[in-house]
Amino acid sequence: MEANEVQELHEQHEHAAGHETLAEEMGHGSLKPVSFTMSVIAVLVAVVTVLGHRTHTEAVLMQARASDQWNFYQAKKIRQNDTLLAQDILSVVTVGDKAAAAKILDGYKSHQDKWASDLNEEQTKAHEFEDKVEHAEHKATKFDLSEALLEIGLVVTSITLLTRQRVYWLLGMIFGAGGLVMAAQGLLLH
């Protein structure tokens, strides 16, 4: 069998199977568009990976701030309870200098009022930080999914280089487009 006949049989087999190859469509094996697509997807994977890492870091920092805020809240709550305990003790113990005891109780009362408002403020701030943590985690999830889709797109597109079948290139671009959509959703979350 001659080389021309082998090539002809190969082409007939591919057409019979219903698969058009990139070599046929692009003129004898030019895979530059596939290589370019892979390069673009690889760059997008890198960008989305960085965005995801930064968003995860933001979530960790916000969680630390929320924990610090809750620590402030607890410290003030403990001081408030200690002062209430001291007030209770002063109210049941017989004190020789009632004027001095009344002055101390008035000081405690002013501290109680201040701490009551401070506690509400500290609690509100802590909840705000917790909301920011939740928001950052939601964004990070979008970036993680985007990264996974882009990586899948890159791998599937690379199969085109081995098989020279257009379907893998198109499928890879579909996964890549899905990754771009998820990245855009992550960027647009406010």
Image: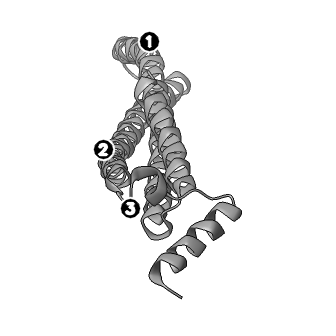
x, y percent for residue 98: 41, 14
Q: Nearer the viewer, mark 1 or mark 2?
A: 2
Quadrant the N terminus occupies: bottom right
Asked whether the beta carbons under mark 1 and mark 3 sit within 8 Å of each other, the answer is: no
For image coordinates 36% across by 44% down, the residue present is 48
Residue pointed to by mark 2: 47
For image coordinates 43% across by 23% down, the residue present is 188
Residue pointed to by mark 3: 29
User: Mark 1 is on which residue type?
Assistant: Asp
Residue pointed to by mark 1: 113
- Mark 3 packing: few (<14 Cα in 10 Å), some, or many (20+)? few
Q: Does residue 130 lie above or below 39 as drawn?
A: above
The image's colouring method is one colour
Looking at the image, can residue 86 be seen? Answer: no
Label 3: element kind:
loop
Looking at the image, can residue 170 be seen? Answer: yes
Label 1: element kind:
helix
The earlier-in-sequence mark between 1 and 3 is 3
Q: Nearer the viewer, mark 1 or mark 3?
A: 3
Q: Does residue 7 lie above or below 16 as drawn?
A: below
Q: Nearer the viewer, mark 2 or mark 3?
A: 3
Distance (Cα) linking label 1 and label 3:
81 Å
x, y percent for residue 41: 37, 48
User: Mark 2 is on which residue type?
Assistant: Val
The earlier-in-sequence mark between 2 and 3 is 3
For image coordinates 48% across by 29% down, the residue present is 185
Label 2: element kind:
helix
